[in-house]
Image (spheres, rainbow, N blue to C red):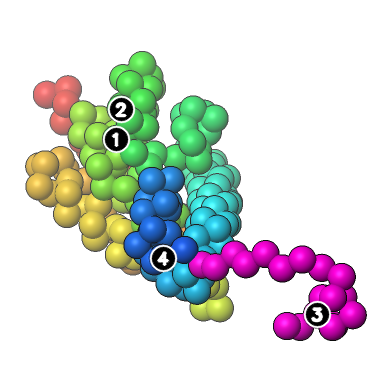
Amino acid sequence: KRLLPTIRSRCQTWAFPRPAGDLAARWLLERKTPDAVPLLAFSGGMPLAAAALAELRGLIAAHQVVTLIYGARDDMVKAVTDAGYDYIMMDKELTRYGGVETRDEGLLYAKWLKEHEGQYDGVIFSMPIFADENGAITALQDAGVPILMQAYPDEIGKMDFAHRRDAYCGKFSVTDVFCQYNVPFTVLKPHVVHPLSAKFQENLRDFAAICRVVNGMKRF
């Protein structure tokens, strides 16, 4: 109806009504579209629009994860080396986003740790986002060395979908699972801390001391 009558008079009309809601939802579910029903409602019952929105949201989420995880890798390298310590780190290309997100990636990291056994005195488990508990425990339950839990703080003004980390809650969730599995770990104050902060430098010195004590006790 928004077209001018002179244009409509020269066109044929083909009606494409929206499919029934249950039919549209079933089509989206068959395509394994995440959050199919809510996205369908948000898209006004148009399944193609809902599918496109799901794809776009997935791309944004992937970009967010890659940016935050890759940034955390760089931050941690700088923090550790600035404090005067050496480090080893699994190559970022070995997992989907450069960190451990799934049980399979946890198994991969556990294997990598085993291959480098004796080359490290402790492990820093960094959480730039809400970490996956299953991946974390699978990766570290047999580490055999002290584990420092570090989580990033959220920043005021960066709480939108593309920047929010939610690592504060994620740290509670991960440490709860480690307690259930009786895997010892170290948490230091504050609960969330940026790796490039002066406070984390204190955390690193304290953790290094813990590692020296634990590794020294192993020799008794």
Amino acid of disc 4: Ala
Amino acid of disc 1: Arg
- Mark 2 to mark 4 CA distance (whole Å): 44 Å
Which is nearer the eye, 156 or 38? 38
Task: Select label 1 or label 4 by which is in front.
Answer: 4
Which is nearer the eye, 169 or 198? 169
The residue drawn where x is 50% and y is 60% is: 47
Q: Earlier in the sequence, mark 2 or mark 3?
A: 3
Which is nearer the eye, 65 or 25? 25
Amino acid of disc 3: Leu
Q: Magenta region, mostly helix, strand or loop? A: loop
Label 4 Cα crowd, 10 Å radius (few <14 / some 14-19 / many 20+): few
Task: Select label 2 or label 4 by which is in front.
Answer: 4
Q: Secondary structure at mark 2?
A: helix
Tag of residue 20 = 4
Q: Secondary structure at mark 3?
A: loop
Task: Select label 2 or label 3 by which is in front.
Answer: 3
Range drawn in magenta: 1-18
Q: Position of residue 152 (x, y in %)?
A: 43, 60
| Left or right of 198, for residue 204 | left
The answer to whether the residue labelled 1 contacts the one labelled 2, judged by CB atoms less than 8 Å apart, is: yes
Based on the picture, tell me whether residue 15 belongs to the magenta stretch: yes
Tag of residue 3 = 3
Tag of residue 103 = 1
